[in-house]
Image (cartoon, rainbow, N blue to C red):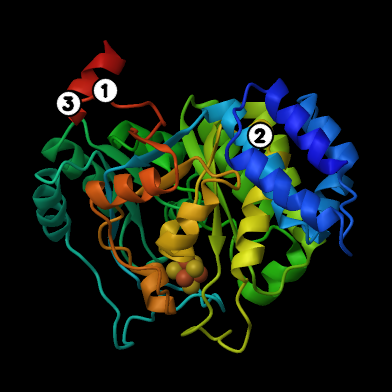
């Protein structure tokens, strides 16, 4: 029954036999056995391009019928993005890991006198970015801890210096909690901080710091961090300035499935209002070296299910990103048939997951990313920070000119 519906829906969506049919065939085999899928009404909604409810999302989360989930997510994914799978040439840059907070899940943040605490000068940051510009990066992604004493002018100077180095380099920087920290340092309203940073050259803000929105979890995991309302208000204000951002969810620690649905609901509501999110980036929690090392991380099954539910539920998001740093490249490849259409990027010098004990690997070349995408049966497309495709042979400078002309 579910098999027939999936194949019908896949055909209706113009999706050729392939991953969907394969998933559906497998699903049918399982339906004949002990596991009877009860997701037919959700199949109908997906086919009709109708929004699923929170209760539907919870049923999907509770389902163990991963093949049906994957097939449904794949229908939405191919409807929105065909067989394309995008990636960006980017590098990460952490200006400092010194932080006044002590989030339980974080091994990156340190106190000033701790071993492993670091601070980069603006000159050191410029040096690192300059060497990677020669490797073709088009985006730098900058975050850090909540530094107790650096003045706000340090951050605007940092952005200006990077823009002076490469005017077309897209600067994506700061999580919502860092932005609130700047507001608190300067005693200025958040809206003014956002304008000052944009005027200095900030192009996008990052999606980090969302964790799980439920106050129950935040009180345990990250006491003192911005609330869910504050996270959303920050992104709302940035979007209302005509700017874009990504959003995240850190999962696989102590959250319930209901709390995951609540998190997705709040993101979907804000996206309805602003359309300012470019992509949703679920982050698999790595407990190994953190204070929560006793927790069992999400399984590969849960990773794929989480991505698939997000793809089906977040109908107003164009893109779902598979964060290979946390998933590992092998699972990230599989995720391309479970709703994911973007593999983030080359991600030179990632430190936050690495310090938590992540084993997903460090940096990919363009060739490695493209090979991984092709092996998964998708078509690699290099994108810019706003998910616009590069044309073959186009340089970052040409792209920026084209889109500002
Ligand atoms: S997650 Fe961010 S705010 Fe929390 S301790 Fe780590 S660096 Fe600081």
Where 292 sits versus 97, above or below? below
Horizontal side of 184 relative to 263 (left or right) equals: left
Q: Which is more N-terminal, label 3 or label 2?
A: 2
Q: Tell me if I can see residue 148 in this picture.
A: no
Where residue 236 appears, as percent x and y from the top left, is: 60, 36
Where 91 sits versus 74, above or below? below
Quadrant for residue 272, please give it. top right
Where residue 269 appears, as percent x and y from the top left, is: 73, 36
The residue drawn where x is 76% and y is 25% is 49
Horizontal side of 354 relative to 300 (left or right) equals: left
From the image, tell me which residue sits under label 3.
393
Q: Secondary structure at mark 1?
A: loop
Q: Which is more N-terminal, label 1 or label 2?
A: 2
From the image, tell me which residue sits under label 1.
391
Q: Tell which residue pokes out farthest to the top in this image.
A: 405
Q: Secondary structure at mark 3?
A: loop
From the image, tell me which residue sits under label 2.
75
Pick the front one: 321 or 254: 321
| Tags 3 and 1 touching, CB below 8 Å | yes
């Amino acid at each position: 029954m579910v098999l027939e519906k999936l194949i019908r829906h896949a055909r209706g969506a113009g999706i050729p036999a392939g991953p969907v049919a394969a998933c559906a065939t497998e699903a049918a085999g399982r339906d004949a056995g002990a596991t009877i899928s009860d997701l037919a009404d959700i199949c109908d909604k997906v086919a009709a391009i109708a929004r699923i409810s929170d209760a539907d999302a919870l049923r999907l989360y509770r389902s163990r019928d991963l093949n049906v989930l994957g097939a449904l997510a794949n229908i939405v994914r191919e409807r929105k993005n065909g067989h394309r799978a995008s990636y960006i040439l980017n590098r990460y840059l952490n200006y400092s890991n010194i932080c006044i907070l002590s989030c339980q899940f974080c091994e990156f943040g340190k106190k000033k006198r701790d071993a492993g605490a670091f601070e980069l000068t603006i000159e050191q940051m410029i040096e690192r970015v300059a060497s990677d510009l020669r490797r073709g990066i088009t985006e730098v992604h900058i975050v850090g801890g909540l530094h107790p004493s650096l003045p706000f002018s340090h951050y605007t100077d940092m952005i200006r210096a990077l823009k002076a180095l490469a005017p077309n380099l897209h600067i994506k920087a700061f999580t919502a909690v860092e932005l609130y920290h700047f507001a608190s340092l300067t005693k200025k309203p958040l809206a003014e901080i956002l304008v000052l940073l944009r005027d200095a050259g900030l192009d996008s803000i990052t999606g980090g710091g969302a964790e799980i929105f439920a106050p129950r979890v935040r009180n345990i995991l990250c006491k003192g961090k911005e609330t869910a309302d504050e996270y959303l208000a920050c992104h709302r204000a940035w979007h209302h300035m005509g700017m874009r951002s990504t959003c995240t969810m850190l999962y696989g620690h102590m959250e319930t499935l209901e709390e995951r649905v609540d998190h997705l609901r709040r993101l979907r509501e804000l996206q309805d209002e602003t359309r300012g999110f470019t992509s949703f980036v679920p982050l698999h929690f790595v407990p190994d070296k953190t204070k929560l090392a006793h927790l069992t991380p999400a399984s590969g099954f849960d990773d794929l299910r989480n991505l698939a539910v997000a793809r089906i539920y977040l109908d107003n998001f164009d893109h779902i990103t598979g964060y290979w740093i946390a998933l590992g490249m092998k699972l990230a490849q599989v995720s391309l048939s479970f709703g994911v259409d973007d593999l983030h990027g080359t991600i030179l010098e990632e430190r936050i997951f690495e310090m938590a004990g992540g084993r997903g690997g460090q940096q990919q070349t363009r060739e490695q990313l493209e090979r991984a995408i092709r092996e998964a049966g998708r078509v690699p497309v290099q994108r810019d920070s706003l998910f616009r495709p590069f044309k073959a042979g186009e340089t970052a400078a040409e792209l920026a000119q084209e889109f500002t002309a």
